[in-house]
Image (tube, grey):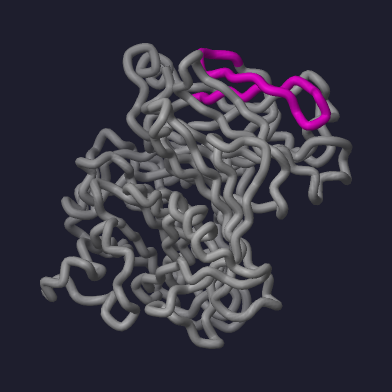
Amino acid sequence: MRIPGLFQYSLNPPALSGDDAAAAEEKLPWWVLLERDAYVAKRDNATTAFALTCNGKPIQVTFCVSRPPRVSYVCVHCPDPDEINTEPTVLATEQGFVLLSVTVGREGDYTDNFDYYVYHADGAEGPSLVLLPRPPYPFRGNDAGVLCYRNDHTGGKEYIVAALRRDWSWPSGQFDLCLYDSNKPGHWNVHRVSLSKRHGCTKRFYHKNCKVMAVGGDAGTMAFADLWRGILFCDVLRVGDEAARRRPKEGEPMPLLRYVPVPKPNDSIQRDARLYRNVAVVGGRLKYVQLHPRKKPLDGLCLYNDGSSTDGYIIEGWMATTWSRPAAATSTSSSSSLSPSSSGQDDRWRQDNNIRDLDTGLKVPNNLGFELLPRRPWQPVLGLQDDADDIVYFTGLVRCMDNKSLVAVAAVDMGKKEMLGATAFSAAPRYIDFAYVHGTVSKYLR
């Protein structure tokens, strides 16, 4: 059966491999790569959680976990086949919490008719699924994130969903911060915020969210990253107290945002930054990876085997670079936020490693069945295990030993310059761009 508005692929999730099934029986991986779009299919296992849609229809969510570089996925099911008519989306993950959006109702109603759910992997009574009240604005995955914190009174886990929104008619550097606190359920709070005086912006200040993530700490710091330009930081656990203290007038912003530029791109800014850059908090450091394609001017359009194209140039190769800085250093002034690794300034970006497709010293184990790194990689994703100094996952075309090509996810140790593994990405036909996120939800699944 085909549901209007859904890709046929989205109704048929891939089967887990025997290795994944055996591994799941022993111990789930500490972290996973998780497809951005969920499958609309009924799957049942120990991770399945249930709720009702805004229309009162039953809905369930199930996680199907694989070890990286294999990509895990989510299945969403509603007995009424007309209730879900576009692919549900994984918006954000943080520890054992996952924020999802599901379009409900008849086809054609999906422009604003989003249900937002928070999946909790390790609740006291097992996995749970909570339908949130409708937020004041619909948001996408690059606008929202989840912060986990401990309830001082009960000792239990709570979460805050935070989304940053900007209306382009507002003065530069002003945003609406939308917060939903599980400890104060039933409604969203909206606060107008702006850059602090120390991080004041010019009229040309521009910020477009690409990713939202939790940094943590006592203040509940969250990072809103524009991967081309810079990162806005906000202490969301203190916003309510600040609003009570300041009592701002309607529309008056509170200067609660701090700003740290990211390493500048080596090329002009274009396309979705998530295809070339990624950021994460790993081992107490803010880690950042940049993928830079080497371009050669070309008259006309260049078509590639993976179905993509470029106009006016051909991609001849690529280079990837990783950077890091202390996660706690979120208030560095923009004038001193970048430096070479030899500067000794630990609160600045430090260049850690780089690798390029022309590196002849790259170690590729024979048992992988691949000759090379991906020819035209995209979407670099940082590994999340603390002991992974610089393991990055790339998606792209790889050449097999039989000279055939396929889309695969490859794991590369940037420091050791070694290809650790690669596997076919079976969901590739569903995507033409950003395909998956990383998260530690698997650590909390039972």
**Quarter of the figure with residue 68:** top left
**Residue at the spot 36% in from the left edge and 64% down from the top edge:** 290
**Residue at the spot 48% in from the left edge and 71% down from the top edge:** 255
- Tell me if residue 378 is in the magenta stretch: no
**Which x, y percent locates residue 350?**
21, 67
**Residue at the spot 34% in from the left edge and 72% down from the top edge:** 263
Is residue 302 visible in the rendered image? The answer is no
**Which x, y percent locates residue 147?**
45, 44
Residue span colored magenta: 44-64
Is residue 190 visible in the rendered image? The answer is yes
Picture layout, residue 246 above or below residue 79: below
Outermost residue toward the bottom? 203
- Tell me if residue 57 is in the magenta stretch: yes
Q: Is residue 30 left or right of residue 277?
A: left
**Which x, y percent locates residue 18?**
42, 17
**Residue at the spot 55% in from the left edge and 45% down from the top edge:** 161
Quadrant, the N terminus? top right
Picture layout, residue 299 above or below residue 28: below
Q: Is residue 391 left or right of residue 318?
A: left
Q: Nearer the viewer, residue 409 or 73?
A: 73
**Quarter of the figure with residue 309:** bottom right
Q: Nearer the viewer, residue 288 or 251?
A: 251
**Which x, y percent locates residue 114?**
74, 43
